[in-house]
Amino acid sequence: MRGTTGKRVVASILLLFSALLLSSCSAPDSGALRFGLSKMPVTLDPRFATDATSSRINRLLYQRLVDFNAVSMPVPSLASWQRLTPLHYRFTLTPDRPRFSNGERLTSADVAATYEFILDSRNASPHRLSLARSIERIETSGEAVIDFILKEADLLFPGRLGIGILPKSLIESGHAFNRSPVGSGGYQLAAWPDDTHLRLKRRSDQLLLEFIEVKDPSVRVLKLMRGEIDMMQNDLPPELIRYLSQQPGLNIMHGAGSNFAYLGFNMEDELTGVDKVRQAISLALDRDSIIQYVLGGAAQPANALLPPDHWAGAPALQQIPYDPEAARALLKPLGYTPDTPLLLTYKTSSDPFRLRLATVIQQQLAEVGIKVELKSYDWGTFYGDIKAGRFQMYSLMWVGIKLPDIFRYVFHSTAVPPAGANRGRFIDEETDRLIEAAESATTIKAQAVLYQQLQSHLLQRLPFVPLWYEDHVFIARDGVAGYTIARDGNYDGLLYVKQN
Amino acid sequence: MRLWFPAVIFLLWLVLALFGPLFALSPDHIELSRILLPPDSHEWFGYDDLGRSLWDRLIVGAQTSFIVSIAVVTISLLVGVTIGALSAFVGGWFDHLVVRIIDIFLAFPGILLAIALAGLMGPGIDNVVIALCVVGWVGFARLSRAQVMTLKNRDHVQAAIALGAGRSRIIFKHLVPLIAAPLIVEATFAIASVVIAEAGLSFLGLGIQPPTPSWGSMIRDGTRYMLVAPHMVLVPGIALMLVVLSVNLLGDRLRDWLDVRTRDRN
């Protein structure tokens, strides 16, 4: 009798255990479309967002006055514009513009309040610097007209108005947009229950979209295969993408990207400041092999910061050849050979994939007589060192570049941090002259020509070695349709995605 | 398990570590076209995520783990035995102080302290050795103190004192030789622990810096490719497991052999 009871207890425990195991094996089904992210957004307030994930998700929550087309030319979004004089732009809101998610109508007062908040130095918006240089004052007339009066002529001005518009009433009440956003975008916040889950609701059809943070790429892949997430974009090693392409029930989409990877140099350093050293480094890099084998072919070789199909891009630039012999020939008169190598330190982030790329570059440079010591740091330390000029050589990436005024920010002699991002301390008269000439050009066409000349000049001086533009990849389970990949990697495709 | 199995594994580790530099190894040579290639008849262990030979990296990793474990155990043994034996022999407030310090170290998880120290001092093989020594001496100190406490009143020690022998002479000439057996057994177990700890620190990025291979960093690199190239984890993982297992088994056998009661029974 006692034995029978014991067996029953054991059987019950086993049954319960099996049930628990089975329940843990099935994918959760909340009815939402689930999007896997490697990193959650930092803030949902577009006035303060600077990281890529926040900017991409904010585009779903807020609408902007201006957007960009395929060649990165500004095009109307919430408003069309007229250039009344070189110092006066008039923006008119479109009549069919959507309301804010709280029901309020979006008016010119909201636009003015958003930009005035950013321009107010007390608010310390990271977007203030580029706007404050241009805008003298903002005037509104009626519900739909906003006049921007500029301090100086700026042909690129409409392109600077890509920040999401917030309701004036909530700005004035000090609403915490960073955690409870209210915008006029295609989505609105449904819930942000914890640091790894963010739920949005599509306003047109109430479709629920859930962003789920899964840091580890392998775990993200397993969750996609098990159906715990439905789709994801980027942040995967090419080997895992190849692996996923062989799995049934998944669809993979590739798209050309504009994110620009480069090798930066400290121009004040006695070694990397030498032109021939930088030229030798550029010739020693076999970019095609790295793209083919390490990036899985998912990148395009780059010659300049702007991609060739950008309206100010320079498609005619000659590609830097892979020529280790020429690199050795450049180093030999300087006294460096593979036996008596040039010693350099190369800083990179501790991201495993970036470290992997750096190790390949280290080997390629060793073959021409440049011995590189790799130093990898966590992002904060690494970025701090780069801004402070504590490096000889480093690798980084520019993400989401739209306007050619990036050249002033990165290469003008007055843009040494903290004033700009001339991290290599590149001081060059001809570069300054070309940047200033382009900025004062009276037509976009003339400006494009000058920026092309500038990019050609930079390729000769090599304050950085252009590496490649990384492609974007989107992977989804069967049943997810309607997504398109954007050139800058934004998530706008989620505005139209469908679940069949 | 018979003695030959752990002995063979241990000897293999020893030979690879000591004579590895004699082989023509190129653990850092990158061959992009061989990225993640699985084991085959030419390359028994396959290639890693940069097309480097896993066999070459395994041998250099064996040297790393051997150097670190021998260095840590030797330093810990010398420091621990000196402190422990002196503490027991001198006694009084000095002994109380040493015991309290040992208690504090024992109350704190050793690997956590090593992680904190390695994090503070920065990565590198020398800092790994220092971090592991800081937590490693305690075991030897406690053991040697306990052993010396039982021996210090023996006749030969009293005779040495009566003859005017100095403390260091008594400790190292008349006491330490008598406690060598348990210390050797403790050292074998410590070697296994240090191999694991070094791999753990390297796994966390606090140990040996790339591109120098270590088993821990090889496992860490491999975890990212578990789905597509499991050999990257299995090769260093199995090597690590076999070495630790063999050292532990040999330590067990040594303890049994040194224990006269067990030996007589067998």
Image: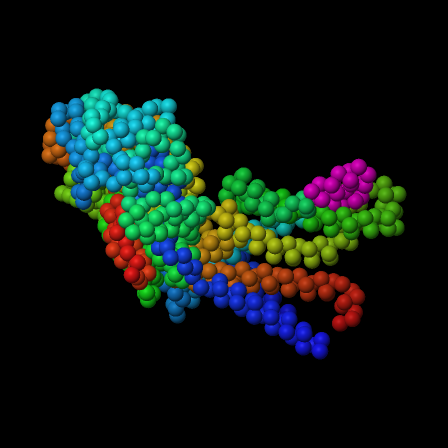
Is residue A380 in view? yes
| A171 vs B40, nearest the viewer | A171
Residue at 67% x, 44% y is: B105
Specify the color scheme: rainbow
Residue at 26% x, 51% y is: A496
Q: Main secondary structure of the magenta part?
A: helix
Question: Is A361 on the left or on the right of A437, as rendered?
Answer: right
Q: Position of residue A51 (x, y in %)?
A: 35, 39
| B129 vs A100, nearest the viewer | A100
Say which quarter of the image contains residue A93.
top left
| Residue with the most extreme front position | A103
Question: Is A279 on the left or on the right of B55, as rendered?
Answer: left
Which quarter of the image is occupied by the C terminus of chain A?
bottom left
Q: Position of residue A109 (x, y in %)?
A: 27, 29
Question: Is A300 on the left or on the right of B46, as rendered?
Answer: left
- Whether B98 is among the magenta residues is yes
Which quarter of the image is occupied by the N terminus of chain A?
bottom right
- Whether A150 is among the magenta residues is no
Q: Position of residue A365 (x, y in %)?
A: 32, 46
Q: Is A198 drawn above or below residue A142 in the view shown?
A: below
Q: How many marks?
A: 0
Is residue A263 in view? no
Q: Position of residue A421 (x, y in %)?
A: 31, 31
Q: Is A176 drawn above or below residue A152 in the view shown?
A: below
| A147 vs A283, nearest the viewer | A147
Q: Is A319 drawn above or below residue A386 in the view shown?
A: below
Residue at 78% x, 71% y is: B265
Residue at 51% x, 40% y is: B122
Question: Is A454 on the left or on the right of A21, as rendered?
Answer: left
The stretch in magenta equals B80-104
